[in-house]
Structures are given as structure tokens and as C-alpha cells.
Image: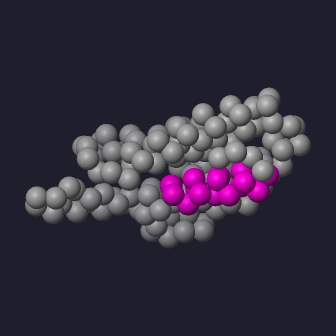
Amino acid sequence: MMYLEQLNRARRFLRRIEKFDRSQVDYEDDLWAFFQNCWHVKDWIKNDQKLSQDIRKAVEKDVAQRDGIMNCADLANRTKHLSLARGPRRNANHVGTDVTVIPGEETRLRYRISSDTVKNRDALEIAREALNEWEELLRQYGLPT
């Protein structure tokens, strides 16, 4: 299944953003790249000719019911296009960043996201939720994860 390449890419980006071992700018690049790659799993499923048309359509429809994935969609599109031309799905947006520096330890970054369904939630939590929702949705249709 071709979509697994994109799903695995999103997993790799999730592993990257779970570590704060680089500059804040580099971390932000990886964070926004995660949301873009995670959202694009939908496009890979939609275009994966190894999947039946019925499954591709059903997954695309069911994605709209998953808050984590839909918050991911808005964050992906905002970071790619600056604004949401087709209208927000959940109106997710980056609303602030908390930086904690503990001498002798790593710097901790918390990117706060708010949307119609979440308020001031950690972007890393939303990232984990979105990836978990993809895995649940794929298993629901008997697809490999």
C-alpha cells in the first residue's frame, strides 16, 4: 500500500518533534512539517490505486469526523498557505509558544493551539492524537498501519 510511505513519514516527524534537541527555529520547521505530512496521508489514501475506490471514498469522508486530524488539516494549510482559502475545518491556529529553559537540561517548548474544539492545547498532544486517529481509522477499514 503506497499510503504507508506517507504514514511512516508522519511517524518519523512525530518522533522528531517529541525531542527538543535543536534550535527553536529548527523545531518549528519539524513541527509544522509534521502537521503537513500527517494531513497529506489523506491525499495518499485518496490516490492509492492499490485501495478500492469504495475504501478511498469512505476514509476521505470519515476523516472529517476526527478532531485531531481536522485540527491537523488547518495547521497544515495555515503553515503552507498562511490563510485558509477554503475555510477552516476546526479553525485551528497557533496561539502562543511557551519556552522553558532549565539550566543543565534541555529547553522545553510548548506550542499552544486553539480551535473550535480545543483551547490552548499542546501541539504535540494534537500531533499524537492525529496520528492515533489515522491508525484507528485505517484499522477500522482493515488496512495495514
Q: Nearer the viewer, residue 134 or 64?
A: 134
Q: Residue at x 75, y 32 (%)?
A: 48
Residue 111 locus on image (x, y percent): 38, 58
Residue 136, relative to residue 35: is it above or below?
below
Q: What is the span of residues highlighted in magenta in the rendered image? A: 127-141
49 in the magenta segment: no
- Picture coordinates of residue 104 (x, y %)? 11, 58
Q: In the displayed structure, does residue 128 sit left or right of residue 84?
A: left
Q: Position of residue 5 (x, y in %)?
A: 60, 34
Which residue is at a point 57% across and 53% down the rendered structure image? 131
Compared with 45, 105 (above or below) is: below
Q: Is residue 19 visible?
A: yes
In the rendered structure, the answer to whether residue 78 lies left or right of residue 20 reads right
Which quadrant is home to the N terminus? Answer: top right
Residue 95 on image: x %, y %: 42, 60
Q: Is residue 71 visible?
A: no
Left or right, 113 with respect to 111, comes to: right
- Between 113 and 53, the residue placed more toward the observer is 53
Majority SS type along the magenta span: helix
Number of residue marks: 0
State yes or no: residue 139 in magenta: yes
| Residue 68 figure quarter | bottom right
Indicate the colouring scheme: one colour
Q: Which residue is the extreme one toward the right?
A: 54
The vertical placement of 76 against 2, above or below, is below
